[in-house]
Amino acid sequence: NEDVTIEQGGYVVSTSKWKRTIIEKKVTDESGEGSATVFDFIFKTRLDVDNEEWFVRFTAPISNDGIFHTDLNGFNFDTHHFRADLPIQSQVFPMPTLASIQDTSQRFTVLSEHAQGTASLQNGSIDVWLDRRLLRDDERGLGQGVRDNVLTRTRLRLLLETDSYTSDPSTEFEITKLCKTMWDELNHPLEVFGTQKVDEAGEKAGAADGMVEAAARSFFLLSETGEGNAVPFVYMVHKRVDDFKHAIETLRNSDFPKGSVPLVVSHDGHVKEMMDYVETLKSEFNVIQIFHPHACYDSPRSFPADDPELNEGYAGDTYGNKRSSWATCAKHHWTWMMKTVFDMDFGKKLSVDSIFFMEEDYVVSPTIYSTVTQGIHLSSNKKDYFGIILDITDGGVHRERGGEDWHEITFRTGPMAIGRKSWQKVVDASDEFCNYDEYNWDWSVVHLMNKRLVPYKVLAPSIAQVRHIGVDGMHVNSDQDTTAAGRRDKAKLRKAAAHWTIPRPFHGTGVVHADGSAKPKAGKPNGGFGHPKDHEHCSNILAPKWQKLA
């Protein structure tokens, strides 16, 4: 009775108890001239029901006549014959790393990265046991039931070959060179080790020297998720070029895959110095530039910037303030940018379901990409998460948590990573988002959370993975903040930004479910976004294409 979620065209299938991911990749064939296709099946299982056994069955158009082969110790092989007069338990054999069936036309092999049980109970099939849970002793020597199940990860590699093997039953079973190569890659993965240098003063070297560790973690995550899955990093930039240079320098020294994963830069206006700097990044990063078509910088005297006519007869926002571009521009840009990126075609080679968003004045940790991908994976397992945030301190307003875990908290502000499902919920609630008298995009999202229109819980690493080095917003300084609480927070941010350092690496995988992640309390908006013209423009951005055409 489990709800089954199917994603990425069936390559990812999951329930609350298990998840199966398929990775398809091309490898060099036996001759070294062509290519062969290899499929990895990655299972993550959590068996918590007594007296159940879970296995996966692979089938192929092969007439093996009940004959199948397993390895004994990774080097020698054994041949087994199915017997219909014996019970199932007598047909299951140890599979340290490999099981295979074949006929005169094809050979089908399943490789594993750890020992499991296997059988071939039907013609053309290989069964591999994933987990089992027994309430009572099975009288096989343990003397008790098996109920200590934990989350288990199993990686199986499937190889279908049509040549380079011998099918003669009178000869001893041997694997092909291609199978040996795949076996080596799976059971002897690349291990990367490094040290952190210490200078003459006894101080540890900078973050760049810790990149070997980050590279190793990135290698594991990329091999697990596959080359086709990517989380683009999206920067919203205006004219704080020096801050953005610091941000990119830390991204350059992180585990972010510069050559493959898109780096989307959304410009709030054609600021020449910023455009020139982004141009220099294109030889190093996979840069995608987009320009806000309604940027206040490009047209400062017309809507959505300062249009004097819009204040004629306008009673003002919640606090009686007249309409001003310092309040309206950033929310319009953010709304357009998110809609544009989620609608973007990244090509057939990339599968994009989530994006990570930052403004131009955030530096990142050496492990930023692996942390983002890990957080997205953890948050995608539950429907009541909006996404993840990467600064649990809210820019230095709060303290970091102890240990290395992910914490379940209430969303307040970015930088954040969210998926298409969460974004679609924002779009579906566009009336509330756009008509709310709040110039901050993040507090507009909090308003939706208070209305229960979008989930309010997020996951955050206990160690902040981004750090805000700027002081003010893109179009606003702290003197223009309309609330005393906002000005107090900005004072804390100024203090934190004055002495910024690169965030520490993070490797946590556990989740702390805290009672503190309560629904945001309803409060008064900060104002600045009360004009009907801004409401209409925002709604038009989020409207479906068919509605705009109509």
Image (tube, grey):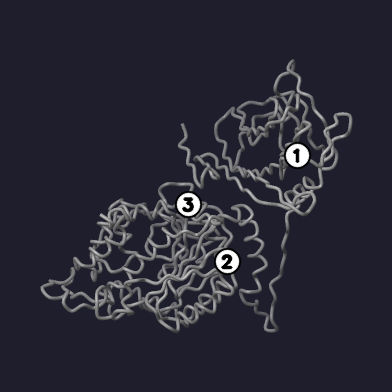
Q: Outermost residue, top direction?
A: 85
Q: Which residue is mark 1?
A: 162
Q: Say which residue appears at 54% left-offset and 58% top-offset.
A: 230
Kindly state the secondary structure of the residue where label 2 is placed: loop
Q: Nearer the viewer, residue 538 or 215?
A: 538
Q: Nearer the viewer, residue 530 or 464?
A: 530
The spot of residue 83 in percent (x, y) is: 76, 19
Q: Say which residue appears at 67% left-offset and 62% top-offset.
A: 216
Kindly state the secondary structure of the residue where label 1 is placed: loop
Spatial CA distance of label 1 from label 2 is 39 Å
The spot of residue 238 in percent (x, y) is: 40, 77
Q: Are marks 1 and 3 in contact (CB under 8 Å)?
A: no
Q: Amino acid at mark 2?
A: Phe
Q: Quadrant of residue 387?
A: bottom left
Q: Nearer the viewer, residue 66 or 417?
A: 66
Q: Which residue is mark 3?
A: 379
Q: How many marks?
A: 3
Spatial CA distance of label 1 from label 3 is 42 Å
Q: Earlier in the sequence, mark 1 or mark 3?
A: 1
Q: Amino acid at mark 3?
A: Ser
Nearest to the eye among marks 3 and 2: give it: 2
Q: Which residue is mark 2?
A: 256
Q: Amino acid at mark 1?
A: Thr
